[in-house]
């Protein structure tokens, strides 16, 4: 099956696999979620919102879709959590081996297990940056190690795991958790030195797994298990921007968008988040240009202001 649609409605010439630098794989799987269901609908809501989004990014002065974004065939396997993990692992690895920048959209968080395994096998000394309200460090849950509550257990054993925004966990997870590399939400709120401290802990290659419930429920109510006290938009993208600028982000996934048909703002926020992350990934050069533009605009503004004062003076002459 081939996707009839392109990502964000971009022209066909930017959507073909051979010239696309980015591959987007959807895994609309919701088999292990325990409370509110609906993460299987996340990708369609994300895609619909993306189609209605402006594709010029002001901040980076870039149109990253021109680097090409290929929408891969969705992973429809849903017969069991372990088969989903296996299928995701195989598919992600295939595109990494084609030198693509691989991005995955869930589905619930268990889909990250296969994704992270593929990246860990492909990049030496991988850091996994995990943004989430939940620690997700259980070694098994409801009889399987491939439950969403176990999303980064394997990563905690095989990669340099850094956890950000955590504010909910089970006491049994303390055993696995390396608290030196965890940034709890309530500490982050009083002290923003966490940004640089987290980046200092990262190795060169970084994979980002982004559970949308890391955001505060006031801006992200559309998720299965919302937790109070989360991150807001600008602090999140400022942090991500720094990570993209200072490290080699090798791929990322976004999971747990559980859309609400009567409130589409969260879907748009996640559409924008995905596009921002791609813009940061590919804009290094454009970003410098952007800073120059800002600087010269400031200069022009100052000159205009001085000129304006002169003109005013002349009128009075
Ligand atoms: Mn979570």
Image (cartoon, rainbow, N blue to C red):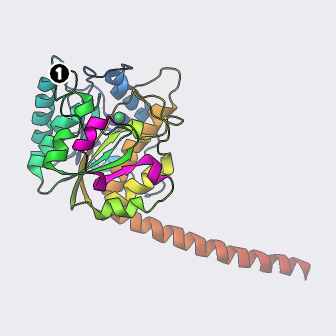
Q: Position of residue 233 (x, y in %)?
A: 49, 46
Residue 136, can we see it? no
Q: Position of residue 199 (x, y in %)?
A: 32, 61
The one nearer the camera, 282 or 258, is: 258
Give me the residue at 15% from left, 19% from top.
80
The residue sitting at the top extreme is 79
| Residue 177 against residue 261 in the figure, above or below | below
| Residue labelled 1 has its Cβ within 8 Å of some atom of ligand 1 | no
Question: Looking at the rendering, in which quadrant would you find the C terminus?
Answer: bottom right
The residue sitting at the bottom extreme is 317
Q: Quadrant location of residue 141?
A: top left
Q: Secondary structure at mark 1?
A: loop
Q: Position of residue 268 (x, y in %)?
A: 47, 35
Q: Position of residue 272 (x, y in %)?
A: 43, 42
| Residue 198 against residue 233 in the figure, above or below | below
Does 277 lie within the magenta span? no
Magenta span covers which residues? 169-189
The one nearer the camera, 23 or 39, is: 39
Q: Quadrant location of residue 223?
A: top left
* Side of 163 relative to 124 (left or right): right
Question: Looking at the rendering, in which quadrant would you find the N terminus?
Answer: top left
Query: Which image quarter has ligand 1?
Result: top left
| Circle 1 residues within 10 Å: few <14, some 14–19, many ≥20 | few
Does 187 lie within the magenta span? yes
| Residue 75 against residue 135 in the figure, above or below | above
The residue beneath circle 1 is: 143
């Amino acid at each position: 099956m081939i996707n009839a649609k392109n990502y964000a409605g971009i022209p066909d010439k930017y959507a073909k696999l051979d010239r696309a630098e980015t591959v987007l794989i959807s895994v609309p799987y919701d088999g292990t979620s325990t409370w509110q269901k609906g993460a299987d609908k996340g990708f369609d809501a994300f895609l619909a919102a993306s189609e209605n989004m402006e594709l010029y990014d002001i901040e980076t002065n870039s149109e990253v879709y021109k680097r090409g974004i290929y929408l891969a065939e969705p992973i429809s396997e849903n017969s069991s959590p372990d088969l989903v993990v296996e299928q995701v692992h195989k598919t992600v690895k295939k595109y990494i081996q084609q030198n693509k920048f691989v991005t995955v959209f869930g589905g619930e968080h268990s889909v990250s297990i296969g994704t992270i395994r593929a990246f860990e096998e492909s990049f030496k000394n991988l850091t996994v940056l995990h943004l989430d309200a939940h620690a997700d460090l259980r070694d098994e849950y409801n009889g399987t190690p491939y439950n969403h509550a176990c999303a980064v257990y394997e990563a905690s054993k095989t990669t340099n795991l850094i956890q950000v925004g955590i504010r909910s966990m089970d006491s049994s997870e303390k055993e696995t958790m390396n608290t030196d590399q965890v940034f709890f939400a309530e500490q982050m709120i009083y002290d923003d030195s966490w940004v640089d401290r987290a980046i200092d802990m990262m190795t060169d290659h970084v994979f980002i797994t982004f559970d949308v419930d890391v955001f505060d429920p006031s801006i992200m109510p559309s998720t299965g298990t919302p937790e109070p006290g989360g991150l807001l938009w600008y602090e999140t993208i400022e942090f991500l921007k720094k990570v993209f600028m200072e490290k080699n982000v090798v791929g990322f996934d976004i999971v747990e968008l559980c859309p609400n048909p009567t409130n589409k703002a969260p879907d748009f926020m996640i559409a924008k988040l995905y596009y921002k992350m791609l813009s940061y990934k590919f804009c290094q050069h454009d970003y410098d240009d952007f800073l120059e533009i800002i600087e010269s605009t400031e200069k022009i503004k100052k000159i205009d202001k001085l000129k304006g004062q002169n003109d005013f003076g002349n009128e009075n002459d």
